[in-house]
């Protein structure tokens, strides 16, 4: 990615744990899967930004915890 396209994520949230489950389809050279991310919210925010490239996200949820 050229330097002019680099995007820096906001510092309002920090990931602390990732859980990833991938299911490859070796006949089509694609995959499906699930990911969950534990975040530490460092300051009040109205949005959370995550990086993704060439992914079709079918469902996204947010579950707050104390």
Image (spheres, rainbow, N blue to C red):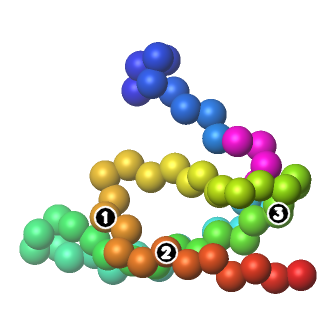
Image depth: mark 2 or mark 3 in front: 2
Magenta residue check for 28: no
Which residue: 10% across, 74% down? 27
Residue holding disc 3? 40
SS under mark 3:
strand
Locate residue 29 relative to residue 62 in the image: left or right.
left
SS under mark 2:
loop
What's the distance in space between the residues labelled 1 and 2, CA to CA? Answer: 11 Å
Tell me the quarter of the image containing the N terminus.
top left
Locate residue 65 relative to residue 53 in the image: left or right.
right
Tell me the quarter of the image containing the C terminus.
bottom right
Report the disc number at residue 56. Answer: 1
What's the distance in space between the residues labelled 2 and 3, CA to CA? Answer: 18 Å
From which residue to which does the magenta span run? 10-14
Residue holding disc 2? 60
**x and y, in percent, of residue 8 in the image:** 62, 34
Count neighbours of disc 1 (C-alpha within 10 A) and say few if under 14, some if 14 to 19, many if 20 or more.
few
What's the distance in space between the residues labelled 3 and 1, CA to CA? Answer: 25 Å
Q: Main secondary structure of the magenta part?
A: loop
Between 25 and 13, the residue placed more toward the observer is: 13
**x and y, in percent, of residue 50 in the image:** 57, 54
Between 58 and 15, the residue placed more toward the observer is: 58
């Amino acid at each position: 990615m050229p330097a002019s396209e680099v995007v820096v994520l906001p510092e309002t949230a920090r990931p602390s744990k990732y859980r990833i489950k991938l299911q490859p389809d070796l006949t089509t050279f694609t995959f499906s899967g699930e990911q969950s991310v534990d975040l530490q919210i460092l300051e009040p925010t109205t949005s959370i930004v995550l990086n993704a490239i060439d992914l079709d996200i079918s469902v996204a949820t947010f579950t707050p915890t104390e």
